[in-house]
Amino acid sequence: MQFKFADFFWNSHLFKQLQYLKMSLSKKISKFINGFFQICKNPWLLNIIIDQNENWEKKTPNHYKKGLNQVSLDQLFPNFDGKLDTVAFLDGGSLITDLLLLKNACKEFEQCKYFEIGTWRGESIVNLIDVADDLNTLDLDTKDYKTYNFSQDYENAHGFFIKDKSKIKQHLGDSTKFDFSGLNKKFDVIFIDGNHRFDFVVSDTKNVFEHLIHENSIVIWHDYAFSPEKIRFEILNAIIKGVPKQFHKNLYHVENTMCAIYTPKNYEGNILKLYDNPKRIFSIDLKIN
C-alpha cells in the first residue's frame, strides 16, 4: 500500500491542533481589534484597565504588598462604643464600624475640631454632632457637578442629612484647588473621603498634612479597602505617596472597617489574613426611625 502523507496529515492530531490554534488566534486578533476601536471611541474605557486593583497591587512597594498593619478598634480606643442615629445603608455610604471609628476618634478630644473632605449625603458628619464642637466639610459646589458628569439624582442627594444643621460649616470647592492654608486652623480629626482617584487622594493627603494637622491629630481615609478584608491598592499607594515618610510608621488599617488611619500613637499591628476567624464580635441594636 502506498503511503499518502497528505491523507495522513489532514487527519492527524497535529492538523487538528493547528486548526484550533488558527481559530484561537483569529478570536484573539478579532478581540484585540474590537477592543482597540472601542477604546478609540470611548477613551475612558482605558481607565478601567489601568485602575484594576491587580495592576495597582503590582505597583505597590514590596513591604506594603500585604497592606498596612492592622490595629483593632479597641486597641485604638479601649472604651470603644457608640450610638448612631443616622445610617442609610445605601451605596456610597460607610460601614457602621467606619462611622463609630470617626465618633470614637472625636471623643478623644475636648471640644473636638473636625474636618471632612467629601461629604455627599452627610451621613458621616451628622453622626458627630454630639461629639465635636467645630464641624467642617469640604465638597464640590453643585455648579461644578457637570464637570464630572454627575447626574441630577446624585446632585439631589448632596447634603441630604445636613441641610438643616446649622452647627456644620460647609466649604465648597474642588479639593485640588481649595486654599487649605486660608482656613488658618488646625484640626483634631480629619476624614479624607473625597474623589478616590489616585491623584486626588495624594493631593488631599498632602494638603491635610501640610496645613491641617497638629502633633496629636488623627487622620482617617475612607475606602482604603473595598471591604474589611480586601485592600484597595490604589488608595494604599496614594496614602504612601501623600503622607510624609516620617509618619509612615504610624499608618494602620483599622480592623473590621474600610478605613486606614494615621495616629501619632504607636501600636503593635498584625498583617491582614484573608478568611481569618473573627477576633472580635459586635452586637447591634437596630431600629427604623
Image (cartoon, helix red, strand yellow):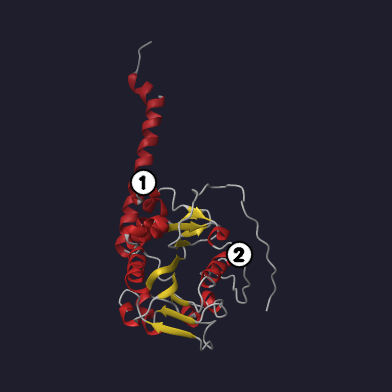
SS of the residue under disc 2: loop
Q: Residue at x 57, y 47 (%)?
A: 275
Give the image location of residue 202, x and y in percent.
34, 65
Q: Residue at x 57, y 71 (%)?
A: 90
Q: Is residue 145 visible?
A: yes
Kind of residue indicated by mark 2: Asn
Residue position marked by numbered label 2 in the rendering = 79
Quarter residue 266 falls in: bottom left
Q: Earlier in the sequence, mark 1 or mark 2?
A: 1
**Quarter of the figure with the C terminus:** bottom right
Outermost top residue: 1
Quarter residue 182 falls in: bottom left
Q: Nearer the viewer, mark 1 or mark 2?
A: 2
Q: Is residue 11 visible?
A: no
Give the image location of residue 177, x and y in percent.
30, 77
Circle 1 Cα neighbour tier, 10 Å, few/some/many (<14 / 14–19 / ≥20): few
Q: Residue at x 44, y 78 (%)?
A: 151
Give the image location of residue 261, x and y in percent.
45, 62
Q: Looking at the image, which is closer to me, 152 or 160? A: 160
- The numbered dot on residue 159 is none
Kind of residue indicated by mark 1: Asn
Residue 71 in the figure: left or right of residue 214:
right
Give the image location of residue 213, x and y in percent.
38, 71
Residue position marked by numbered label 1 in the rendering = 62
Q: Looking at the image, which is closer to me, 256 or 33? A: 256
Tell whether label 2 touches label 1 (CB within 8 Å).
no
